[in-house]
Image (cartoon, grey):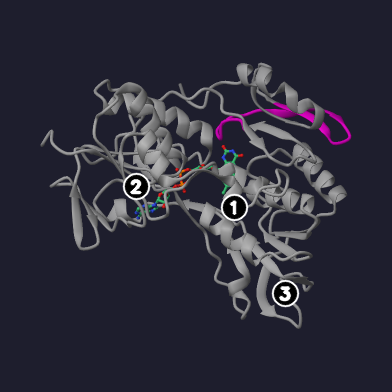
Amino acid sequence: MTEQGPIVIVGTGLAGYSLAREIRKQHKDVPIVMITADDGISYSKPMLSTGFTKGKDAEGLAQAATEAMAEQLNLKLRTYTTVTGIDTDNQRLLLGEESLSYRKLVLAWGADVIRLTLPGEGQERVFPINDLGDYRAFRKALKPGSRVAIMGAGLIGCEFANDLRNGGYEVDVIAPSDAVMPSLLPPAAANAVQTELEALGVSFHLETVVERIEPADTGLTLFLANGEKRQADLVISAVGLRPRTELARAAGIDTGRGIKVNRALETSAQNVYALGDCAEVDGHVLLYVLPLMACARALAKTLVGVRTDVSYGAMPVMIKTPCCPVAVCPPPAEAVGFWETEQDGSHVKTLFKNADGEVLGFAVTGRFAIEKQALSKVVPPIHS
Ligand SMILES: Cc1cc2nc3c(=O)[nH]c(=O)nc-3n(C[C@H](O)[C@H](O)[C@H](O)COP(=O)(O)OP(=O)(O)OC[C@H]3O[C@@H](n4cnc5c(N)ncnc54)[C@H](O)[C@@H]3O)c2cc1C
């Protein structure tokens, strides 16, 4: 193995830039090259679903220009450059016709949105929103008084629903589940969020799906599986994300739900690492900011020579539905126990306890949301 060549980081999302920052805290001038398929503008992705609440458009949500990031982090940054393959034997990254050698390679290339292939002629009015460019396109298409249908009632669907209502838009949410955020929230907390979103004017159509989207005289008609029809001008598709694994798999790197790495963020290929939305860390696929920050801190140390395992504490997820603030720490998937709930209308505190009374998870909404920090100290870490 050559000790020549830079650390190459693919991706300038929160994972890529956080890692570059952490490396610079450890080492001022180890050579770093960052490569991104997009424009490299630094932004905080969670803020995309707060644009109207915070009075910001896509440009307002951008935090730093690409050149400023390259200068601040003292690195080379290549934008609009798509990685097409990895030659792990020769430690080269393939960029179409070109190739680039690496000493260490970090994959921080995120997750793809799941795209539904629905019949009908209305597809060009369907917007998945998973980066600043997507958000820019959506905001450009959104006109005063637009009616927006959101497919999906997960965290992203609910946050956009709240934000668009704050912006004065009509919002329908359509989803197959019988509750909002079913994989994240226990029923009492989910009901509280749904109730408050409905009070804000969001119209929910649960236990059904959009089957077809057709242009109408004005806007679109959405045909739902339950026989209902809804009118909209734009559709946000928020039906889920899938870690980007294809290029890694093609290069012979082990993948599962994400690119498999151990707690030192090492993939199965020598000198190739992964973190962020593309990674499956010791069996965990956590598409959130706190885990990727913990990974960035650990991996920076490893890359400058001190091999370091990531350790996660409890990682509460804050859901940005200002009409009903929520913090949740789901119990481990294999945990056995029951939810114990204290409730005052939409103010809910629900704790997941085992038979010994230990708190293994929680969800707090409304005025109980301020208890998240204290509760985070009580629940066990995701893995130590
Ligand atoms: C609307 C919304 C709200 C959210 N809210 C929260 C929240 O409140 N709390 C929370 O914890 N998490 C939240 N999340 C999730 C969180 O934002 C993500 O987990 C995180 O931003 C992922 O960062 P990443 O760097 O791994 O991926 P990304 O930001 O997707 O970055 C991927 C990078 O890889 C590049 N890339 C991809 N493929 C290639 C290729 N082949 N060649 C070159 N470059 C490539 C892309 O151009 C991009 O630069 C939210 C997500 C969304 C969409």
Real-space CA distance between mark 2 and mark 1, rounded to the nearest whole angstrom: 34 Å
Q: Say left or right for 150 vs 281.
A: right
Label 3 belongs to which residue?
223
- Provide the residue span drawn in magenta: 330-351
**Residue at the location (27% across, 29% down)?**
303
Q: Position of residue 312 (x, y in %)?
A: 48, 25
Q: Amino acid at mark 3?
A: Phe
Q: Which residue is mark 2?
A: 255
Q: Is residue 93 left or right of residue 160?
A: left
Please tell me which residue lies in front, 30 or 289: 30
Could you give the CA–CA distance between mark 1 and mark 3, rounded to whole angstroms?
31 Å
Q: Position of residue 268 (x, y in %)?
A: 26, 40
Q: Secondary structure at mark 2?
A: loop
Q: Is mark 1 within 8 Å of ligand 1?
A: no
Residue 3 visible in the picture: yes
The residue drawn where x is 61% and y is 81% is 121
Crowding at dot 2, Cα within 10 Å, few <14 / some 14-19 / many 20+, comes out as many
As helix, strand or loop, the secondary structure at mark 1 comes to helix
Tell me: residue 214, above or below residue 36.
below
Q: Which label lies toward us, 2 or 1?
A: 1
Answer left or right for 83 relative to 154.
left
Residue drawn 73% across the image and 21% down it: 371
Q: Position of residue 325 (x, y in %)?
A: 75, 35
Does 337 lie within the magenta span?
yes
In-image side of 297 versus 188 (left or right): left
Quarter of the image with the C terminus is: top left
What's the amino acid at mark 2? Thr
Quick one: label 1, few (<14), some, or many (20+) residues within 10 Å? many
Residue 14, compared with residue 297, is above or below; it is below
Residue displayed at 13% across by 36% down: 4
Q: Which residue is mark 1?
A: 58
